[in-house]
Image: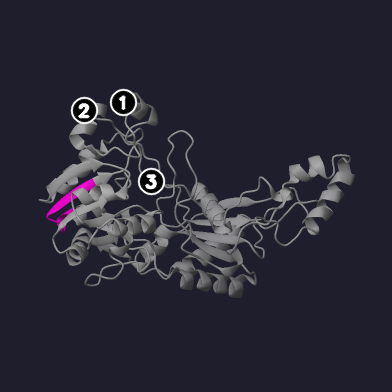
Amino acid sequence: MERMIGTTSRGIRAPIIREGDDIASIVVESVIKAAASEQIVLNDRDVVSVTEAVVARAQGNYASVDDIAEDVKKKFQDETIGVIFPILSRNRFSLCLKGIARGARKVVLMLSYPSDEVGNALVSLDQLDEKGVDPYMDVLTEEKYRSLFGYEKHTFTGVDYISFYKKIIEEEGCEAEVILANQPNAILSYTKSVLNCDIHSRERTKRLLKRDGAEVVFSLSDILNSSMDGSGYNKEYGLLGSNKATEETLKLFPRDGQEIVDRIQKMFKEQTGKEIEVMIYGDGAFKDPVGGIWELADPVVSPAYTKGLEGQPNEIKLKYIADNEFSHLEGEELKKAITEYIRNKGENLFGDMTAEGTTPRRITDLLGSLSDLTSGSGDKGTPIILIQGYFDSYAK
């Protein structure tokens, strides 16, 4: 009988992961048990993805607010620090800011507007238009912002982030000043020591700050990029990708991920005989159409993956072929023609009209987004995802 199912994505339940657990063994055992219980046949090129949270938890990759403060003091020498372009997030940034303030004498907090880097809005573009504010040029003090827009609260969280972040700074005994601007050099009128907290544009921001006269510049990826007296750390991403764990500790983005995914793949081969692809995933790369929030607050979708997941899809657009190449055919004749066309497609369809409209994204970004949507961020209890049939096509 002809197979009628294409790609499937299943959330796999796992035990609650604790520090010191053997995450590789847990992943393999959980998938094999789930497959047996649901009569799922594992195949070569199935994909098993594991959320970064449980990998970091098993590693014990945690750090405290005091660890952040120590590194900030070390790097900024108790100067007034310009903290610019953070995202608006209690989970992602509040403890980072708490540690920064604990390690500083004064913080000048510069927020981007009308929204942060990932789409959390302070105000709307319509409100800017109404007040005649140019977000590309205008620098707003807190007082000026309040006179224009009052006390706006986040649509989903109900938090006034200007007040929330300012309170965090002041509760650490640190002087706080808030401004709003979108040009990095606006902070240099206040201080020449800057910590830029943007995620995906961080290298450009750092370059522009240095060009325009900043004397001390670090990115959030530079804070806790090495251990503070035994703390967790991430050599490549520092505090980027961190999440609040308790009121005084953060879970950092996992490290040494390549070793982990390669080990999991090897264990699957030994126990099932199948060549399973493995990846670690964080936030998916997609935008909410209602709230306008772009989900990707992690520095990358996937910090580690096996070699078979490298590259981009090389696919043709079926409807384009059906409507153009084979518009004169139908039924079994059309099916046979398209199947043959797929089997004989080129190895690289970049720029080819037959690929127009397919998703030009990396395989790991696509699979990571699928995994994130499948697992969710709540109480589903499925930190492992089994994806099957992704590399199949209409011709198989």
Tell us which disc is closer to us: 1 or 3.
1
Q: Is residue 383 above or below residue 150?
A: below
- Residue in front for this viewpoint, 39 or 170: 170
- Residue in front for this viewpoint, 273 or 387: 387
Q: Give x and y (percent) for residue 198.
A: 34, 52
- Going 21% across and 27% down the picture, which residue do you hit? 147
- Going 23% across and 62% down the picture, which residue do you hit? 216
Q: Which residue is mark 2?
A: 147
Crowding at mark 3 (Cα within 10 Å: few <14, some 14-19, many 20+): many
Q: Which residue is mark 3?
A: 117
The numbered mark, 1 or 2, whose residue comes first in the sequence reads 1
Q: Which residue is mark 1?
A: 131
Q: Which residues are magenta?
A: 101-109
Q: Quadrant of residue 298?
A: bottom left
From where the camera sits, is residue 86 visible?
no
Classify residue 195 as left or right of residue 332.
left
Q: Quadrant of residue 308?
A: bottom right
- Could you give the CA–CA distance between mark 1 and mark 3, rounded to whole angstroms? 22 Å
The type of residue carrying mark 2 is Ser
